Image: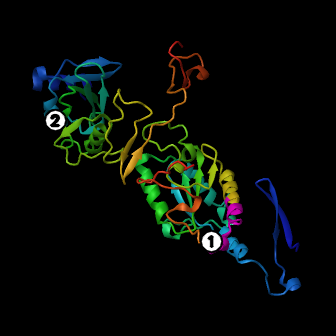
Amino acid sequence: MDATSQAVIGGKTTTEFGYNTKIEGEVVHTTVDAALNWFRKNSLWPMPMGLACCGIELMAVGASRFDISRFGSEVMRFSPRQSDVMIVAGTVTYKMALAVRRIYEQMAEPKWVIAMGACASTGGMYRSYAVLQGVDNILPVDIYVAGCPPRPEALLDALMRLQDKVSHEPITRDLKRDVAPEKYGRMGLELGAHGEVLPEKP
Amino acid sequence: MPTSLELAGQLREKFGDLISGPLEFRGEVTVTVADAERIAEVCAHAKAALGFDLLLDLSSIDNYGEDPRWTVVYELSGIGHGCHLRLKTHVSEERSQVPTVSGVWRTADWHEREAYDMMGIVFSGHPDLRRILMWEGYPYFPLRKDFPLAGKPTVLPDTAFTRPAPLEGGPFVTLPGGRDSAAREPRVRTPEE
């Protein structure tokens, strides 16, 4: 079996190394960062925040035809304590925003957010008094997915991009510098009294 | 089997001048109840004696700029006879209060909460008159005609906030009776159009 395979993710060519015990023995050399990131990126357990029709596409992604378990993310956790990535799928109303925010806060670090679809990303077609204009007003979003609703393939692409992002996170360097997230500050976002993202200071 | 007109007539026999003459339009019968304070009494009679055992819908209209400002609309139906009857009653802006009919039909409970949340009409005697769509503590009633579509900024510290939505060029207006769907669909329209 070929030990290496090439894949094109997000326009970049990456080489993934397999491991052949017959040739290389039973020892693997790696860095702590690479190993931890490898564990993390292949077991991103989602918190399915299905709020509207995007939730139906999210279910399709989990089912057998598209099969999110190919990427290690099939374990939909309905408890925020056990999940790594919140997939915000659908329209976030101001009333629901409180609950979304609270569930995000209950998730353990490290945690990531995918804003799935137009509504979660920008408010979509709902320009109204009732709808939060993009979940990034209250959460630090890692990946935005376009579409109304997005195809399951689009969400799988988002997941692959997130894996790519996770695999490049400098975990140990951050530990050494003691920049472990203070208050939800993984992306350097400062939050106001009622949970909204404040504008960046110059 | 009675017809809607006959049932409206029976309602008028019972309550007299309180009930306006039934108005029929496209097969639907509407009567207006002159005194909003007696709407629960009329509804209770319609259910008990005339067989209107189903409240299909309860809605409210904002006649902005007119007096009385509010119209509350009750859509009645009966499983037994299958007839439909619409009751309307007017409420002034100063009063903004109607007796609840949740004691007559239990389904009115949430309908009245919605009418209260969106329009600000208080249903006196309601068992649980909280907001149902907007968050508790929200200071406005968004379906009133004088409320902007984009919303108003609000903050309830540590609880919730809203901001006006961006409406670049909007609001997006649907044009009825356009020659094709492209002409009818919601888009930015200047007043000259």
The answer to which image quadrant residue A47 occupies is: bottom right
- Dot 1: chain letter: A
The reply to whether residue A185 is in sight is yes
- Please name the residue that numbered disc 2 is placed on: B40
Q: Foreground: A57 or B122?
A: B122
Instruction: Answer with left or right where residue A41 lies relative to residue A91.
Output: right
> Magenta stretch: dominant SS?
helix
The reply to whether residue B86 is in sight is no
Q: Which quarter of the figure is the N terminus of chain A placed in?
A: bottom right
Say the numbered circle drawn on residue B138: none
The amino acid on which the numbered mark 1 sits, given as a three-letter code, is: Arg
Task: Pick out the residue farthest to the front.
Answer: A202
Q: Position of residue A34 (x, y in %)?
A: 73, 73
Mark 2, Cα crowd under 10 Å, few <14 / some 14-19 / many 20+, is: some
Q: Closer to the observer: label 1 or label 2? A: 1
Confirm whether the magenta stretch covers residue B38: no
The answer to which image quadrant residue B61 occupies is: top left
Instruction: Answer with left or right where residue A165 lies relative to residue B25.
Output: right
Which residue appears at 25% of the width and 24% of the height? Answer: B69
Q: Position of residue B11 (x, y in %)?
A: 16, 26
Q: Secondary structure at mark 1?
A: loop
Which residue appears at 40% of the width and 46% of the height? Answer: B161
Say the numbered circle drawn on residue A177: 1
Confirm whether the magenta stretch covers residue A174: yes
Q: Is residue B56 above or below residue A80?
A: above
Which residue appears at 40% of the width and 30% of the height? Answer: B148
Q: Secondary structure at mark 2?
A: helix
Q: Position of residue A155 (x, y in %)?
A: 65, 54
The answer to which image quadrant residue A86 occupies is: bottom right
The part of the chain drawn in magenta is A162-177
